[in-house]
Amino acid sequence: MNQSHLMLYKAGITRRQATGVLAIFALLVLGSAFVPFARAQASVVATVTVGASPGAIAYDSAKGELFVTNFDSDTVSVISDQTNTVSANVSVGKGPDGVAYDPSIGEIFVSNTRAANGSDISTVSVISDSTNKVIATIAIPDYVDGVAGIVYDSAKDEMFVITGSSADVSVISDRTNQIIENQEVDFNAQYAAYDSSKGELFLSGYAQGSVYVMSDSTYESVANVAIGSGTFGIGYDPVKGEIFVADQHSNTVSVVSDSTNAVIANVTVGSDPFDVAYDSAKGDVFVADSGSNTVSVISDDNDSVVATVNVGTSPNGVGMAYDSGKGELFITNAGGFLSTTPGNVTVISDGSAPTSSTSSPVTSSTAVGVTSSPASTSTSSSPSYSSASSTTSSSGGSLLISWSYVGMVAINAAVFIMVGGFVATKRRNARRGDGPYPYRCGT
C-alpha cells in the first residue's frame, strides 16, 4: 500500500469515491479556465472646463491633444491629455460646430456654422497643431447658418463639409485648401462618418429617418438606409465594418453593415442618445445619452450594454473623441446652447491603460459635427440586445465582474463545501468504526 492509498484508507474513502471527487475537481478547474475573471469598467477620471457651449471634439494622435469647439465662444480649446488641462484657446469663425483632424499634415479643420458679419458666407478655419494658430480660412459660399459637421477622408486627403439645411456636401482638398466639389445630396445632414474600407461616407441628420451613403470617388449616392425618425450621431467600426447610428426617438443605437447597407441590430441605451464613439482598444461603443446625463457602453461582441457611466449635464458629444494613447474617451457637456457659461469635458477611462494621477479637470467630446481619426471612429456588432449590468459614479474605478463568473464562483464554493463535508464525515465515521468498508488494495 503506497502513501496515497494509506491516506485514503485512514479517511475511510474507497478508490471509486476518490476518483469521483478528483473528476469533479478537474471539471471545476477546467470550466473556470473558460470564464473571464473580470472586465475593467469605464469610470470618470477628470473634468476639464472649456468655453461656452462646447460641442465637437477631435483627437490629435501626434501631439496627444484634444481640440474642442466652443459654439458660443467662437473658439477652439486645446486640451493636453497628459495633464487634462487647457493649453490654448484658438479664436476661429462664428459658431464653430464641427472639427476633424488631418494626420497627414498635422492640421485641424473647424466648420463655422454662422456667417460672419451678416454675409452669406460660412467658413472653415484651418489650425496648425504645431503653433495652435489659424493658418487658413476657407469660404463656403451661400450657406448662411448651414455648415454643420466635417469629416476627414484618409484615402483621398479630403475634408467633407456637411452643409445641413442646404442639403449639400462641399469637398475640400487638404493640399490646396480649395473646394474641389459641391455635391447636392438632397439630404439634411448634420453628422458624418467615413468608412475607410469601402471609401464611403455615411451621413445622418435629425428627423431624416435614414442614413445617406455617398461614394468618395464619384460623390454620388450609393444607398439610403432606413433607420428611426430621430437619427443623430454616427460612428464607424473598422474592425467589423459596421456603422453605429444614435436614434433619439427610440432611445436606441442602430447597427448598419457596410457590406449590405442594412440594419442588423438595434441596441437599447439611455434617454436621448446623441452620439457614438468607437473604442479601438476594447471593441466597445460609447453612447452619449443627453437626456439621462449618462454614457452607455456597448460591447461590440454581443451588442449589449455592459455599463452605464454618470457624467455631466447634457452630454452632447457628436463625434466623441477616443484617445488611443491614454485609453480614454472625451465627451463634451454643453449644458445648453446660446450661453456664456463655460461648459466642460468629461474624461472617461476605459480601463485599458493606467489612468493619470493628475487631479486637474478635463473635458472633451464632439458636438454638432463629426470627427474622424485616421483609422478608427465607430462600433460594431451582431444582433442581440440586453440591459446594462453596472453603473459607475463620477469618481474612481472599479471592476465589472461578469455574472457568469459570479455564478461559477458560487457553484465552485458550494461543491467544495459539499466535498469538504463528505470527507469530514468519512473521517469521523472511520474513527468510530461505523463507516463504509475501509479502503483495501485491489478494490
Image: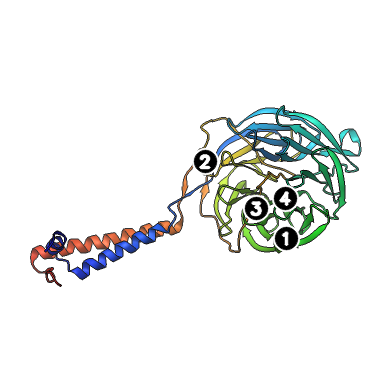
Residue at 14% over, 59% down:
3
Q: Quadrant of residue 231?
A: bottom right
Secondary structure state at the residue bearing disc 2 = loop
Tell us which disc is closer to us: 4 or 3.
3
Inter-mark Cα distance, 1 to 4: 18 Å
Inter-mark Cα distance, 3 to 1: 23 Å
Amino acid type for the residue under numbered disc 1 = Gly
Residue pointed to by mark 1 = 228
Q: Quadrant of the N terminus?
A: bottom left
Q: Earlier in the sequence, mark 3 or mark 1?
A: 1
Tell us which disc is closer to us: 3 or 1.
3
Secondary structure state at the residue bearing disc 1 = loop
Q: Are marks 1 and 2 in contact (CB under 8 Å)?
A: no
Residue sitting farthest toward the left: 433
Amino acid type for the residue under numbered disc 4 = Ala
Inter-mark Cα distance, 3 to 2: 21 Å
Q: Earlier in the sequence, mark 3 or mark 2?
A: 3
Residue at 72% over, 62% down:
261
Q: Residues within 10 Å of mark 2 (few under 14, many from 20)?
A: few
Q: Position of residue 193 (x, y in %)?
A: 72, 50
The label on residue 206 is none
Amino acid type for the residue under numbered disc 2 = Ala
Tell us which disc is closer to us: 1 or 4.
4
Residue pointed to by mark 2 = 353
Tell us which disc is closer to us: 3 or 2.
3
Residue pointed to by mark 3 = 238
Q: Position of residue 205 (x, y in %)?
A: 77, 53
Q: Quadrant of residue 252?
A: bottom right
Up the image or down, 294 lies above or below 25; here it is above
Q: Are marks 4 and 3 in contact (CB under 8 Å)?
A: no
Inter-mark Cα distance, 1 to 2: 36 Å
